[in-house]
Amino acid sequence: MSTTSSQSVSNPPATKGGAAAVYIDERLASSNFTKRLLDKVFPDHWSFMLGEIALYSFIILLLSGTYLTLWFKPSMTEIIYNGSYMPLKGVKMSEAYSSTLDISFDVRGGLLLRQIHHWAALFFVAAVSVHLLRVFFTGAFRKPREINWVIGTLLLVLAILEGFAGYSLPDDLLSGTGLRIAEGIMQAIPLVGTYLAMFLFGGEFPGTDFIPRLYSIHILLVPGILLALVTVHLIMVFYQKHTQFAGPGRTESNVVGYRLFPVYMAKAGGFFFIVFGITTLIAALVTINPVWMYGPYTPSQVTAGSQPDWYIGWLDGAVRLTPNWETNAFGHTISWNLLIPALIIPGIMFTALGLYPWIEAWVTGDKREHHLLDRPRNAPTRTGLGVLALTFYLILWISGGNDILATAFHLSINQITWSFRVLLFVAPPLAFVVTKRICLGLQRRDNDKLLHGYETGRVLRLPHGEFIEVHEPISTHAAAVILGKEDIAPLALEAAIDENGVRNPKAKKNATRARLSSWFYSDNVATPTDEELKAALEHQAHALHEAQEHSGAIEGH
Amino acid sequence: MAISRRHPAALFAVLAVALGTTGAAYAAVSAQAAPKATVASATQVDQGKQLFLEGCSSCHGMAAQGSSDGPSLIGVGSAAVDFQVGSGRMPMAGPGIQAVARKTQYNTSEIAALAAYVASLGPGPSIPTAEMVNTSGADLAMGGELFRTNCAQCHSASAKGGALSQGRWAPSLMNSNNKDVYEAMVSGPQSMPVFSDKTITPSEKKDIMLYLSELQKNESPGGFSLGRLGAVTEGLFIFVGGMAALMIVAVWIGARAR
Ligand code: HEM
């Protein structure tokens, strides 16, 4: 690649590529920009590739989706199916469903593309979610990346919505059942719910307007917003630079890694093809959403084992767990059984998710910029909170499959539901405590390794008969990783009355904060100080030396 | 070569013969499997009564009038007995939420005798004749519609079965033959409703049987079916299979970087 500057007009570049670069440079004055772009450095860690998986599955979705739009007909017009799938021949159905059958059975490569599209959708939301977990557990959301975290939260919500919209388009029995539930949830919104549902569905459910509307939302509106937000998201990663884990030579003010060009680009490009390849392989081998088996949607039918895609499963589970509560007030029925699980709980969860960077900063009082990542064990309270939320989510998720569990393990669905109701409140706090313990244990082990070296597994017998295991100092890399941990003291409690005898009006609020901050930090295990470390290293060297001498003596006999 | 000179029609001739014999054999076998619901002989009823007193009366009462341990069987008809005893659900092993299908405890003629005895107690749906479960000429698509409308809410659209309340379940229908399906419909075992000839006509019953035998072929045009359990197994697969594979690759690429 040429790094020619604009002055090079006078001495023309030797290669064709160089000429092209100059051509573009002269018109876009981009050489400086391009050069800076290509010299950008990216740190390396496998977990930084999770965002890439999300990005690539999004691209696969756009490509495969475009192919599907060539054949799919978003229309509720009733027709008689006359395609090649015999068990449905002659059945009345919507054009939406019949065109989905056509894609599956009569369009060349249609079934493969349908399956690629659907598997990629599952991949997309899965990758986004795991990427979110990595950003959370490493503390990458801290200043200055809070805004990007919020954009990320929006991306997650949109990804889920987009998936649900797609799942609902074919108008088969499962998607219709899902939409019916979505309509019920809309109607549960007090006062405006019924109007909202009427407005969206253009009248009574299911009606003929909704599928075409959903189609515009699914192929235009949401992907458009997603694309725009993903772009902003990546530009921000770019400008704020990627975070990195602590290690030798890595500081808060540098980035150690590979240039964007050529190493990082080659790796990223290669990885794109791997993601595409694995998605295609799965799609070619494994069925997903066999709509032909569910039949066309009719409000009078429902099938056992109706399940939404995995990312909606937790909402379905929340609905399944909530008891049948309703209140009648002023001639209106408030359906708590839908309001709580489908609107209030997700509302709280997504709000808490989006605001988490600020919540943590407020609790810890930490307003500094962070470009070095935390190892999850070094932020035990955050890690514990994350596992708490994850446990809550997982229990809801499993509850969404309570009927499948009941069938598979011959359990009573009622007992399962009750157990999960109890677990939903008991397990998350327990998970918090256990996770925090584990983190603190790992911190202690790290300190141990630092101070006493690692166990080599070599055992020596000393002259007086004692056996000792030889410890050797850990590598400088490992030591740098451990020493990358920051010890932060909890906020100090401010006096309620200052030295002049004046009452501090903020004392009460500050006291709560100090307490929270001490809850967040206080039982952290302190990293050894420089002196302790120096002393320990000397001791290690001495012990090692002695051991070797003795072993020499034994061998000499 | 001899092979290349063989007349192309030979293949079709062989196929036709093969199909013909299979069809004839099948007809013969299925005619045997569904004994003709002829008028039971008095000796058969007596034999049935004897068997009943030994094996069933402890729960259903000496005259099949019912007891606290089992319902009255007067008027349930021979179809119910053939279904319950033929599938090994009766005699029930012990108290339970739902009688479990086990190994059949009686041979064919004993089952016929038990059925004849119960049928003699009062009129009820009888064991179908071979004609009644012969699905040739039935309407496949209609069967699908009827199945999804009447059966899928319990047995699931893929006939893989499903959970009902309080630990009850609707079993998978992947191994049920036409006679089972017919008898289950007319007798309505346990939590399953009765589908009399008024709700689902005899010819519609045939449509359902035909559709079920189509499902039982277990064809899966899209590849592995993941047990046909729908989105739950698909969701598990994307994490355990898909994400895991990609993360292994990511770790591998990451490790190269060092
Ligand atoms: C459409 C979905 C998304 C795509 C395509 C995407 C893509 C990416 C990519 C490629 C990176 C850089 C590599 C990496 O750190 O993995 C990144 C970084 C980041 N993402 Fe996402 N992301 C998405 C959703 C999310 C979500 C749901 C969140 C959290 C709520 C989030 C928060 C972040 C943050 C804070 C960074 C900066 C990380 C750092 O510098 O260490 N993203 N994203």
Image (tube, coloured by chain):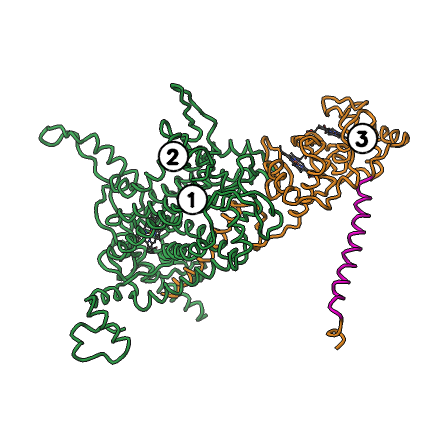
Chain colours: A green, B orange
- Residue at position x 60%, y 36% from top? B149
* Chain for numbered disc 1: A
Which label sits in the foreground, 2 or 3? 2
* Image quarter hosting the N terminus of chain A: bottom left
Inspect the image, locate mark 1, and give the three-letter code of the amino acid beneath it: Pro
Q: Which quadrant holds residue A198?
A: top left
Q: Position of residue B216 (x, y in %)?
A: 66, 47
| Range covered by the magenta-colored residues | B7-35
Q: Are marks 1 and 2 on the same chain?
A: yes
Residue A425 shows in the view = no
Q: Position of residue A214 (x, y in %)?
A: 41, 43
Which residue is label 3 attached to?
Answer: B55
* Chain for numbered disc 3: B
Q: Are marks 1 and 3 in contact (CB under 8 Å)?
A: no
Circle nearer the N terminus (1, 2): 2
| Magenta portion: prevailing SS class | helix
Q: Which quadrant holds residue B91?
A: top right
Q: Position of residue A227 (x, y in %)?
A: 33, 52
Q: CA distance from mark 1 to mark 2?
A: 14 Å
Q: CA distance from mark 2 to mark 3?
A: 64 Å
Question: Looking at the picture, does residue A138 appear above or below residue A207?
Answer: below
Residue B28 among magenta residues: yes
Which residue is label 2 attached to?
Answer: A199
Q: Are marks 1 and 3 on the same chain?
A: no
Q: Are marks 2 and 3 in contact (CB under 8 Å)?
A: no
Q: Residue furthest top?
A: A330
